[in-house]
Image (cartoon, grey):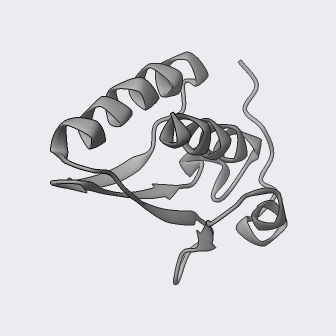
Protein backbone atom coordinates (compact mmCIF):
# COMPACT_ATOMS: atom_id res chain seq x y z
CA UNK A 1 0.00 0.00 0.00
CA UNK A 2 1.26 3.45 -0.87
CA UNK A 3 1.45 5.76 2.11
CA UNK A 4 0.26 9.36 1.71
CA UNK A 5 2.72 12.22 1.41
CA UNK A 6 3.38 14.61 4.27
CA UNK A 7 1.13 17.70 4.20
CA UNK A 8 2.15 19.15 7.58
CA UNK A 9 0.16 20.00 10.67
CA UNK A 10 -0.24 23.65 9.74
CA UNK A 11 -1.95 22.73 6.45
CA UNK A 12 -4.19 20.17 8.14
CA UNK A 13 -5.30 22.35 11.05
CA UNK A 14 -7.88 24.51 9.20
CA UNK A 15 -9.74 21.33 8.23
CA UNK A 16 -10.16 20.22 11.86
CA UNK A 17 -11.99 21.57 14.89
CA UNK A 18 -10.32 21.86 18.27
CA UNK A 19 -6.96 20.42 17.22
CA UNK A 20 -3.59 22.11 17.75
CA UNK A 21 -0.07 21.74 16.43
CA UNK A 22 2.17 19.77 18.79
CA UNK A 23 5.07 21.63 20.31
CA UNK A 24 8.41 20.72 18.76
CA UNK A 25 7.19 18.33 16.08
CA UNK A 26 4.96 18.02 13.04
CA UNK A 27 1.94 16.48 14.74
CA UNK A 28 -1.64 17.26 15.72
CA UNK A 29 -2.84 17.16 19.34
CA UNK A 30 -6.19 17.18 21.07
CA UNK A 31 -7.56 16.24 24.48
CA UNK A 32 -10.96 14.58 24.69
CA UNK A 33 -12.94 14.61 27.94
CA UNK A 34 -15.67 12.10 28.69
CA UNK A 35 -18.12 11.61 31.55
CA UNK A 36 -16.18 8.73 33.06
CA UNK A 37 -13.57 6.03 32.41
CA UNK A 38 -16.04 3.65 30.75
CA UNK A 39 -17.04 6.27 28.17
CA UNK A 40 -13.39 7.15 27.47
CA UNK A 41 -12.41 3.51 27.08
CA UNK A 42 -15.43 2.76 24.85
CA UNK A 43 -14.43 5.65 22.58
CA UNK A 44 -10.85 4.37 22.45
CA UNK A 45 -12.14 0.92 21.49
CA UNK A 46 -14.22 2.37 18.63
CA UNK A 47 -11.23 4.36 17.41
CA UNK A 48 -8.92 1.36 17.67
CA UNK A 49 -11.10 -0.45 15.12
CA UNK A 50 -10.98 2.55 12.76
CA UNK A 51 -7.21 2.82 13.21
CA UNK A 52 -6.74 -0.85 12.33
CA UNK A 53 -8.74 -0.43 9.12
CA UNK A 54 -6.61 2.58 8.18
CA UNK A 55 -3.40 0.83 9.28
CA UNK A 56 -2.66 4.06 11.11
CA UNK A 57 -2.38 4.10 14.88
CA UNK A 58 -2.56 7.07 17.24
CA UNK A 59 -0.34 7.97 20.13
CA UNK A 60 -2.66 8.38 23.07
CA UNK A 61 -2.66 8.62 26.82
CA UNK A 62 -5.69 7.88 28.99
CA UNK A 63 -6.33 8.85 32.60
CA UNK A 64 -9.85 8.23 33.87
CA UNK A 65 -12.16 10.35 31.67
CA UNK A 66 -9.45 12.13 29.66
CA UNK A 67 -7.73 10.93 26.47
CA UNK A 68 -4.82 12.95 25.09
CA UNK A 69 -4.16 12.22 21.41
CA UNK A 70 -1.16 12.94 19.18
CA UNK A 71 -1.40 12.19 15.46
CA UNK A 72 1.54 12.02 13.06
CA UNK A 73 2.49 9.60 10.31
CA UNK A 74 5.88 8.40 11.47
CA UNK A 75 7.05 6.92 8.17
CA UNK A 76 6.23 10.22 6.43
CA UNK A 77 7.91 12.33 9.09
CA UNK A 78 4.82 14.35 9.90
CA UNK A 79 1.11 14.89 9.32
CA UNK A 80 -0.54 13.27 6.29
CA UNK A 81 -4.10 12.74 5.06
CA UNK A 82 -4.22 9.63 7.27
CA UNK A 83 -3.98 11.87 10.31
CA UNK A 84 -6.76 14.13 9.05
CA UNK A 85 -8.98 11.12 8.36
CA UNK A 86 -8.35 9.64 11.80
CA UNK A 87 -8.84 13.01 13.53
CA UNK A 88 -12.23 13.46 11.83
CA UNK A 89 -13.25 9.92 12.83
CA UNK A 90 -12.24 10.67 16.43
CA UNK A 91 -14.28 13.87 16.46
CA UNK A 92 -17.35 12.12 15.04
CA UNK A 93 -17.09 9.26 17.53
CA UNK A 94 -16.73 11.73 20.41
CA UNK A 95 -20.05 13.36 19.44
CA UNK A 96 -21.91 10.04 19.75
Placement of the N terminus among the 4 image quadrants: top right
Quarter residue 49 falls in: top left
Image point (61%, 73%), residue name:
20
Which quadrant of the view contains residue 28?
bottom right
Horizontal arrangement in the rendering, residue 45 relative to residue 31 (left or right):
left
Could you tell me which residue is drawn at 32 percent across and 51 percent down? 34
Q: Which of the two residues, 12 or 77, is positioned nearer the viewer here?
A: 12
Give left or right: position of 8 versus 48.
right
Residue name at image x 63 percent, y 57 percent? 77
Q: Is residue 17 left or right of residue 72?
A: right
Q: Is residue 33 above or below residue 41?
A: below
Tell which of 8 and 46 is nearer to you.
46
x and y percent of residue 42 in the render?
30, 30
Q: Is residue 63 above or below residue 53?
A: below
Of 57 and 76, nearer the camera is 57
Above or below 57: residue 7: below
Q: Number of labelled discs?
A: 0
Residue 3, image x, y percentages: 72, 32
Residue 44, position as x, y percentages in the image:
34, 35
Q: Residue, x 50% and y 28% (percent of image)? A: 51
Pick the front one: 47 or 52: 47
Amino acid sequence: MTRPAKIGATAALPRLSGWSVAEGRDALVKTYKFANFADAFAWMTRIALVAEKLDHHPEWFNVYSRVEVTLSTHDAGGVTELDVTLAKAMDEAAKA
